[in-house]
Amino acid sequence: MTRGPIQLDVAVSYGLPRKGLPSAVSFNRWVAAALDGRILRADLALRLVDEREGRSLNHHYRGKPHATNVLSFPAELPKGVKLPLLGDIVLCAPVIAREAREQRKPLTAHYAHLTVHGVLHLLGFDHDDVRDADAMEAIERGILAGLGLPDPYA
């Protein structure tokens, strides 16, 4: 069983109707699994958005004219400030639902994967090259297996 950090605060907000979306309890569990053994204290915000908000954020921060499944915004704390603030994760519900259908994945498993993926980005993991991508995917597979979920890359 995943314990996660000693102190974990995940603020979950929904920018669209919650029907059919995972609960805050599920998101907390997935975040705790991603952080387990990596960090002792963590605060982060997780927001679920519609396609319009997702497109606006992706355009503003990444210059892309479309919504994407997950965006991660690591906290940029002033030098010398020591807080457990990790940052923000944005999940675009319509994109995630569409991907799950197209890839024939259980929707909950896809949300879990993208939550874990976003948390790892907050911790500094990336997939800019093949080696980094392989390493990050291996970590994701291990975390999801620990949650009893299938390999998202299979």
Image (cartoon, rainbow, N blue to C red):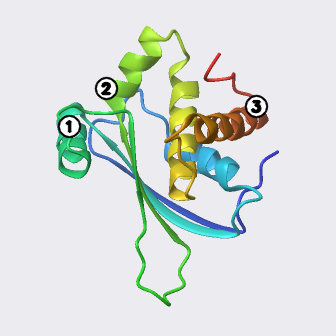
Alpha carbons under labels 2 and 3: distance apart:
25 Å
Whole-percent x and y of residue 121?
52, 51
Residue 104 is marked as none
Q: Residue at x 70, y 26 (%)?
A: 149
Position of residue 5 relative to residue 110, above or below, is: below
Whole-percent x and y of residue 124?
55, 57
Q: Residue at x 72, y 60 (%)?
A: 38
Q: Which residue is under mark 3? A: 145
Q: Which residue is under mark 1? A: 55
> Which amino acid type corresponds to the residue marked 3 in the rendered image?
Ala
Determine whether the residue tagged by mark 1 lies in a helix, strand or loop.
Answer: helix
Q: Residue at x 59, y 67 (%)?
A: 42
> Which amino acid type corresponds to the residue marked 1 in the rendered image?
Arg
Whole-percent x and y of residue 76?
40, 72
The N terminus lies in quadrant = top right
Q: Residues within 10 Å of mark 2 (few under 14, many from 20)?
A: some
Q: Which residue is under mark 2? A: 94
Indicate left or right for 84 with 56 as reference: right
> Which amino acid type corresponds to the residue marked 2 in the rendered image?
Pro
Q: Nearer the viewer, residue 1 or 53?
A: 53
Q: Residue at x 26, y 38 (%)?
A: 16
Alpha carbons under labels 3 and 1: distance apart:
31 Å
Whole-percent x and y of residue 98?
36, 17
Q: Furthest residue to the right?
A: 1
**First of labels 2, 3 by sequence position:** 2
**First of labels 3, 1 by sequence position:** 1
Alpha carbons under labels 2 and 1: distance apart:
11 Å
